[in-house]
Image (spheres, helix red, strand yellow):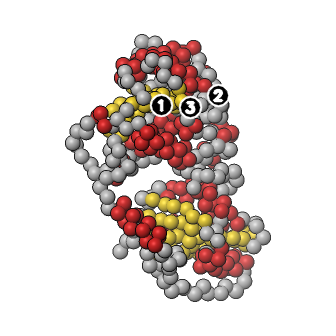
């Protein structure tokens, strides 16, 4: 029988770094603490970090085999936890394929949360990893005794009991702020109660034409881009004669587009918001796809395979999605029943639309956004969403 929620405890190490290496992983029932599966293996000569990633991968594979839907992955490796959470860059080329493999496994579950724990709370996985390392080193392997079921966490405090009850209620709700949890309905909703978000990609730049990665580099609008900004401003004024706010990424290609729109709406102020800035493409900024494919083939494959992988020196799409979702939620709360214009870039707009449509990550590779294209969706306080248009470029047809 499949279990819904599990805890994966994983560890790995090597004697010498690099040296004889191995990993261990334990899968527990989240509620009872019962051990459901163990995995361990000697992996020859390797490093601590490689062994730790191998332990995580083995634990996630075991959880998937058990049919788990929710996973909390606990490790005493700060590096792996932070990298898989999208907060730290994966600088070592040898770890990127392993991180991509782990990220692909993560996508098989409804939810995965990564947590750092001190080593003394990871004793079972640590013992399995040490037994595997003994095997790799050719020493006598001591049998790891199976633990009796134990509490996965400390005894529940009143606050933790309340949190569990709230989580249980959230798991069975039919409405909420997450579009994916709202009860499906064909019933028309009154648009005057919705927050309408008009998302505009900035006008064209020289790098747009040259098809170069344009992340944090402050590339200005070209002459064509400025003309597109004026045409877009006229179109937005037709779509929304009354606008509560105009927001923009802080980069000049966006602020120039936003200023043209704000002028057409009666000289509204343009408010810069960092959460709408483009993804940081790191070492790939300013390079074409072909140049990146030639210079970083393995890193590019890993990045294309998972939103949790960042370009060298850059930012993952998972991190961009987190700040974009935060920005969207803030606008829904701050402007109920009003219209807001946001001028941003390809990555944040794609991620906002992905979430609005409750789509998967493949959506990001299948959606094309033109320079100065307009997308519109409505949001209601209960989490309901109606996407009205995507990448409207009719205003650019005569350019």
- In the displayed structure, does residue 6 sit left or right of residue 87? left
In this view, the residue in front, 134 or 69, is 69
Disc 1 residue crowd, few under 14, some 14–19, many 20+, Cα 10 Å:
many
The residue under label 3 is 272
Give whichever of discs 2 and 1 has the lower sequence position: 2
Q: Tell whether label 3 touches label 1 (CB within 8 Å).
A: no
Most foreground residue, 311 or 322? 322
The residue that label 2 is drawn on is 218
> Residue at the location (39% across, 30% down)?
339
Q: Secondary structure at mark 1?
A: strand
Query: Helix, strand, or loop for circle 2?
Result: loop
Q: Is residue 367 left or right of residue 222?
A: left
Q: Is residue 181 left or right of residue 136?
A: left
Separation (CA) of disc 2 from disc 1 = 18 Å
Q: Is residue 234 above or below residue 352?
A: above
Foreground: disc 3 or disc 2: 3
Which numbered dot is residue 207?
Answer: none
- CA gap, disc 3 and disc 2: 14 Å
Q: Position of residue 293 (x, y in %)?
A: 62, 39
Instruction: Indicate whether 343 appears above or below 351.
Output: above
**Nearer the observer, 340 or 188:** 340
Residue shown at 52% from the left, 70% from the top: 8
Residue that label 1 marks: 342
- Toward which corner of the image does residue 291 lie, by quadrant? top right
* Location of residue 127 (image quadrant): bottom right
Q: Position of residue 41 (x, y in %)?
A: 61, 74
Q: Quadrant of the N terminus?
A: bottom left
Give how far across and how far down residue 42 sits, in percent.
Answer: 65, 74
Q: Is residue 209 above or below residue 148?
A: above
């Amino acid at each position: 029988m499949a279990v819904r929620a599990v805890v994966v405890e994983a560890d790995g190490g090597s004697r010498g770094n690099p040296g004889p290496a191995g990993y261990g992983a334990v899968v527990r029932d989240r509620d009872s603490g019962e051990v459901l599966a163990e995995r361990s293996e000697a992996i020859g000569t390797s490093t601590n970090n490689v062994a730790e990633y191998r332990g995580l991968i083995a634990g996630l594979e075991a959880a998937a085999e058990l049919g788990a839907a929710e996973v909390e992955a606990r490790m005493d490796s700060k590096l792996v936890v932070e990298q898989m959470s999208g907060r730290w860059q994966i600088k070592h080329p040898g770890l990127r394929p392993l991180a991509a493999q782990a990220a692909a496994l993560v996508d098989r579950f409804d939810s995965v949360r990564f947590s750092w724990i001190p080593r003394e709370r990871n004793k079972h996985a640590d013992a399995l990893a040490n037994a595997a390392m003994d095997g790799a080193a050719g020493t006598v392997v001591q049998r790891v005794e199976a633990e009796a079921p134990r509490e996965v966490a400390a005894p529940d405090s009143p606050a933790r009991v309340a949190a569990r009850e709230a989580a249980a209620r959230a798991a069975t709700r039919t409405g909420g702020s997450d579009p994916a949890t709202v009860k499906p309905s064909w019933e028309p909703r009154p648009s005057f109660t919705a927050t309408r978000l008009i998302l505009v990609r900035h006008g064209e730049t020289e790098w747009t034409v040259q098809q170069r990665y344009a992340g944090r580099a402050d590339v200005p609008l070209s002459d064509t881009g400025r003309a597109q900004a004026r045409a877009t401003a006229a179109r937005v004024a037709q779509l929304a004669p009354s606008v509560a706010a105009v927001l923009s990424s802080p980069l000049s290609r966006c602020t120039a587009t936003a200023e043209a729109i704000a002028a057409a709406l009666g000289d509204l102020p343009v408010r810069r918001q960092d959460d709408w800035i483009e993804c940081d493409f790191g070492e790939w900024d300013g390079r074409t796809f072909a140049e990146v494919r030639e210079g970083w083939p393995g890193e590019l494959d890993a990045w294309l395979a998972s939103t949790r992988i960042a370009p060298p020196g850059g930012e993952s799409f998972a991190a961009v999605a987190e700040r974009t979702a935060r920005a969207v939620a803030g606008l829904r709360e701050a402007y109920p029943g009003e219209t807001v214009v946001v001028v941003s870039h390809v990555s944040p707009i794609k991620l906002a639309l992905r979430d609005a449509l409750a789509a998967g990550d493949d959506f990001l590779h299948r959606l094309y956004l033109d320079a100065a294209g307009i997308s519109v969706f409505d949001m209601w306080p209960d989490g309901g969403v109606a996407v009205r248009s995507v990448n409207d470029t009719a205003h650019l047809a005569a350019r």
